[in-house]
Amino acid sequence: MAFIVRRHADDVLEAMDHNPRSDLRQLLRAGLSKSLVSLVIKVATAGLTYAMYVILSRSMGVTEYGYFAFGLALATILSIGANFGQQTAILRYWPEAMVGGRPQQALVALRSGGAITIIAGLGVSLALILVATGVGGSGGGSVAHLYAAAALILPMALAEYWSSALRSQGSVWTALGPRDLIWRLALPLCVLALTALGIGLSGWEALILTAGILAAALALQFVLAGVRRYRIAPGVAGLGTYWQAHGKASRWFFLGTVLDAVALNADIILIGLFVAPAAAGIYFNAFRTAGLLTLFTFAITLVVAPMVAQHYHAGEMRKAQAITALCAWAGFVFSLAVFAGFWMFGDQILALFGGTHEQGWLLLILLAVGLLFDAATGPSRIVMMMTGHERDYVRIFGGVIAAGMLVQLAVIPAFGLVGAAIVNMAARIVAQLAIAVWSRRKIGLDTSVLGAFRVNMLSDRLA
């Protein structure tokens, strides 16, 4: 697959590289090289994550696994919210400040973002603990998984922020390795070891174990970053000035990232509430499997986000368009191949989780169709965020997702899992097309697979 993507990238380069003043070939090869490293990590991550889900699903039982899936989805949404948009902000503000010759401003942004993440993470965790206490006190059923989810929020939030902070500085291995490889390798190994000893995990115990191992991986990441002279330590010096300058934009970054998390996890939570925990587990497995389709899109976006910010704010529109076109094509080719695999072997893949997966293939295909459109429209979200149009992204994407959630409230009780998957697919298609069209018209960058044909039509502008 990497060979096919590389060959296609070379073909695109031949068509685009007519301007000797702009070394697009070198730029895109550097971007592709880092993206393939990111892909290798993300492929390993996907395999390890999949192994983790399979092992937990088989060892915990349907109901307890459902509690685990519910708690993990809830912690994911709340941890993204706990970042308060800083994981996106640093991807923009670090390269923007550095290209403008303001390294001290970049450092203040990085430290302040870390401080905000820690403060907000603790606050959100406390809020969930209070909610769990209230639900438990009113006889609302088991709440142990809610307490455990609260313990997972801060480690997940800090892991996301540090990954972005390191990627903004050009790191790939240090940014992704500890969380994506070490954490996801250690967790299934611990579960296997416990199973071999005859120790079964409940949903809340699995969540606590997840939080503990992630915290250990973060400690290792902090040490590695220091050894390699990357900056990730939080600090409050300059926090007030930073918030005064970027607080308003941070609120929009926050809303944008919460919307992304909601779009990925809301279905699972609603199914757990309106159907059953076991049904949430089935849908969780289908959705996480479908998510493999956009693996390369996600991997390459991790690399190109700060590059888009750097070239756009420097006025280098041709380079910004070229790097987004590379992202779109690489992600789409990969996604199309994975979709074909799902179509032919979807049932066998879902069977790895054990238990019954009624309608699993249909759920997988419906969810994958929406994600295929996501890949075809390229890095539209990150382009809007990196170019200063985060408010418009929230309005467009948020409006579609909010409408989809309202429809879900009526569809899930009546039509169950298939209804949820159809609404998810339709909402994702509409949302991605809308923001891709908006980006082309208002920003001047075509994020879709058609963007490769616009590179030579653009002119650089004064920064």
Image (cartoon, rainbow, N blue to C red):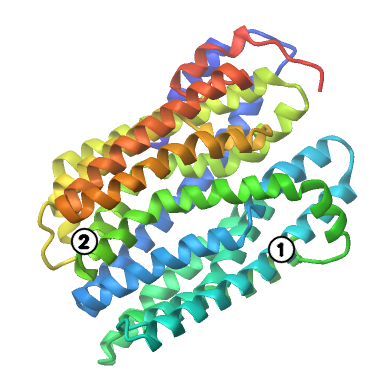
Q: Amino acid at mark 2?
A: Ile
- Which residue is painted at 67% across and 40% down in the image? 306
Q: Amino acid at mark 1?
A: Ile
Q: Label 1 neighbourhood size at 10 Å, few (<14), some (14-19), many (20+)?
A: many
Identify the secondary structure beneath mark 2.
helix
Q: In terms of depth relative to the viewer, which is nearer, 265 or 31?
A: 265
Label at residue 282: 2
Question: In this rendering, is residue 391 above or below 453?
Answer: below
Q: Are marks 2 and 1 in contact (CB under 8 Å)?
A: no
Horizontal and vertical percent position of residue 102 = 89, 42
Inspect this view and state whether residue 292 appears.
Answer: no
Find the distance from the CA under tag 2 to the CA under tag 1.
36 Å
Q: Label 2 neighbourhood size at 10 Å, few (<14), some (14-19), many (20+)?
A: many
**Residue to which mark 1 is pinned:** 116
Horizontal and vertical percent position of residue 349 = 19, 54
Who comes first in sequence, dot 2 or dot 1? 1
Farthest residue to the front: give it: 138
416 to the left or right of 81: left
Quadrant occupied by the N terminus: top left
Horizontal and vertical percent position of residue 7 = 44, 25
The mark total stands at 2
